[in-house]
Image (cartoon, helix red, strand yellow):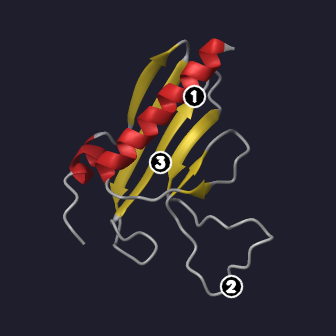
Amino acid sequence: MREDHGIKTLLDLHDQIIDQGGGYWVKIEAWVVAISVDIPHGIRYSLTLHEPYGKRILGYDNAHAVKPPKKFKYAGTRLPYDHKHRHVSDKGVPYAFKDAHQLLSDFFVEVDHVLEEIRKS
C-alpha cells in the first residue's frame, strides 16, 4: 500500500469542531489503530455534521461493518468498515476509502451539499 500523506492532516484535525454557520457544526475525530483487514489504513475516524440541537445529520466513519440489505447474501464476504451515514436514520452505506485527503474532500463536499439543501428549504 502506498503512503498516505493525508493521514497526518486527518490526525491533526482530531477533536476539532468547525462552525458551519446557522448553528450547524462539524466534528472530526481520528486516531491511529493497528492495521488490520478491516482497517487497512490504520486510522479509526469519525467525521460528522450536526444540526443546531446536536443531532448528527451526516457522518463518515469506520466504527462498524456495514451490512448489506437483507435481500443480498453476504455470507463469507468481508463487510466494509469505511462507510457514510447520509441522514439521521441511515444505518450506513459503504464508502470507498482511497486516502485521507480524498476522505476529507468527499466529506466536506457533501457537507456543503447538505447545508445548501437545508438553506434552500
Whether 86 is drawn above or below 24: the answer is: below
Closer mark to the observer between disc 3 and disc 2: 2
Q: Earlier in the sequence, mark 3 or mark 2?
A: 3
Outermost right residue? 71
Q: Amino acid at mark 1?
A: Val
Question: What is the C-alpha distance between the residues marked 3 and 2?
Answer: 27 Å
Which residue position is annotated with label 3?
A: 46
Q: Earlier in the sequence, mark 3 or mark 1?
A: 3
Q: Position of residue 70 (x, y in %)?
A: 79, 69
- In the image, taking residue 110 as reference, residue 70 lies left or right, namely right
Residue 12 visible (yes or no): yes
Secondary structure state at the residue bearing disc 1? helix
Whether 62 is drawn above or below 107: the answer is: below
Few, some or many C-alpha atoms within 10 Å of disc 3 (few <14, some 14-19, many ≥20)?
A: many
In the drawing, what numbered circle is on residue 75? 2
> For residue 78, which quarter of the picture?
bottom right
Which residue position is annotated with label 1?
A: 114
Whether 35 is drawn above or below 97: the answer is: below
Q: Residue at x 68, y 85 (%)?
A: 75
Question: What is the C-alpha distance between the residues marked 1 and 2?
Answer: 34 Å
Q: Position of residue 44 (x, y in %)?
A: 41, 58
Which is nearer the eye, 23 or 67? 67
Q: Which part of the image, by quadrant, shows the C terminus?
A: top right
Q: Residue at x 53, y 33 (%)?
A: 49
